[in-house]
Amino acid sequence: MKTSDATQPLVSIVTVNYNQPELTCALLKSIDQQDYCAVQVIVIDNGSRQNPANIIQTLFPETIFIRSEKNLGFAGGNNLALPVATGDYLFFVNNDAEITPGCIDTLTKHFEQHSGTGIVSPLICYFDQQPEVIQYAGMSPIHPLTARNRTVGEREPNQGQYQQSTQTAYTHGAAMMITRKTLEAVGPMDNGFFLYYEELDWCERIKRAGFEIWMDPCAKVYHKESATVQEMGALKTYYLTRNRLRFMRRNFPLLPLSFFFLFLWLITIPKNTLLFLLRRQTDNLWAFWSGILWHFGLKKNSFEQ
């Protein structure tokens, strides 16, 4: 999409499309409007009902298009780009996001200024809201007892309160740039999550490998929040439940994990079961319990099928 510039490190921009070619094209247009020239753009179609290859390749002929006949999830879809991505940096961006001017250049320069950085996210704001509202300005660590954390700045009006780059516990999957060196050291995101917690798990592995996680507010991305995810209902409940436990099992040692499971059985499970019953949300109740039982051998169910 851009001509090569030998003075700039190459950035491979990866996005995954799933039944939303209009949103994907809007993202590609925002990439075209960047001043940064050394980019390789890769679009993965994650098993959409209709193959959007003609639409995307006609409007953006220099884009590398890869089609999967099956929905491989967030990590699986993004990972399909890795064999063809040749950039010094890889920038994973949701297809329902748009990149602001200077974003790519700012993020690449961040790595020059903070040499210990393995992965960085920009400031992420909700798309087309006035006054501007923040979605992400960093994240707190996952609490070892509750398996919960906090997104810094979420739902705050953007009044310039986040102006300094800061280390953070996790990047945001809607927009994150990783170095080639980091990727080679830790490997790709884990396909097994399918949806939710992939980038959090990735960040834990990145930290264990000795790299830093940053948020740089000098770069900004607008996120439209996927309508597909918003409509998932019970499927969202299932994967949030299943993957919260999977994340904890993969990233916490035995002693704190024991306290987490005690809290889970004594507090979390009774509370959520009662709430779903009182709200008469039987579909979410089934999804919640299916997500828990997956960890006890119920690995095939209607949600994963």
Image (cartoon, helix red, strand yellow):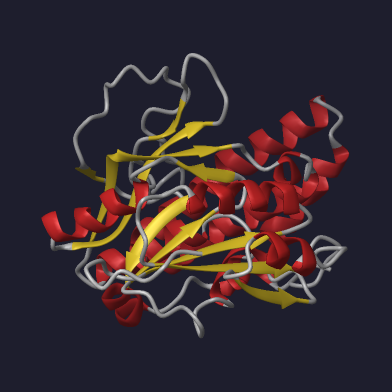
* Number of numbered discs on residues: 0
Depicted 34 relative to depicted 48: above or below = above
Location of the C terminus (image quadrant): bottom right
Depicted 56 relative to depicted 95: above or below = below
Query: Which one is in front, 90 or 8?
Result: 8
Q: Residue at x 25, y 66 (%)?
A: 8
Q: Residue at x 75, y 51 (%)?
A: 20
Res. 199 visible in picture: yes
> Residue 290: percent from the left, percent from the top?
76, 57
Depicted 161 relative to depicted 7: above or below = above
> Residue 225: percent from the left, percent from the top?
62, 38
Quarter of the view holding residue 36: bottom left
Query: Which one is in front, 231 or 157?
Result: 157
Quarter of the view holding residue 232: top right
Q: Residue at x 59, y 40 (%)?
A: 268
> Residue 131: percent from the left, percent from the top?
48, 14
Residue farthest to the top, as pictured: 131
> Residue 286: percent from the left, percent from the top?
82, 49
Residue farthest to the front, as pictured: 3
Res. 192 visible in picture: no
Query: Which one is in front, 189 or 266?
Result: 189
Relative to residue 42, is residue 232 drawn left or right? Answer: right
Q: Residue at x 79, y 55 (%)?
A: 19
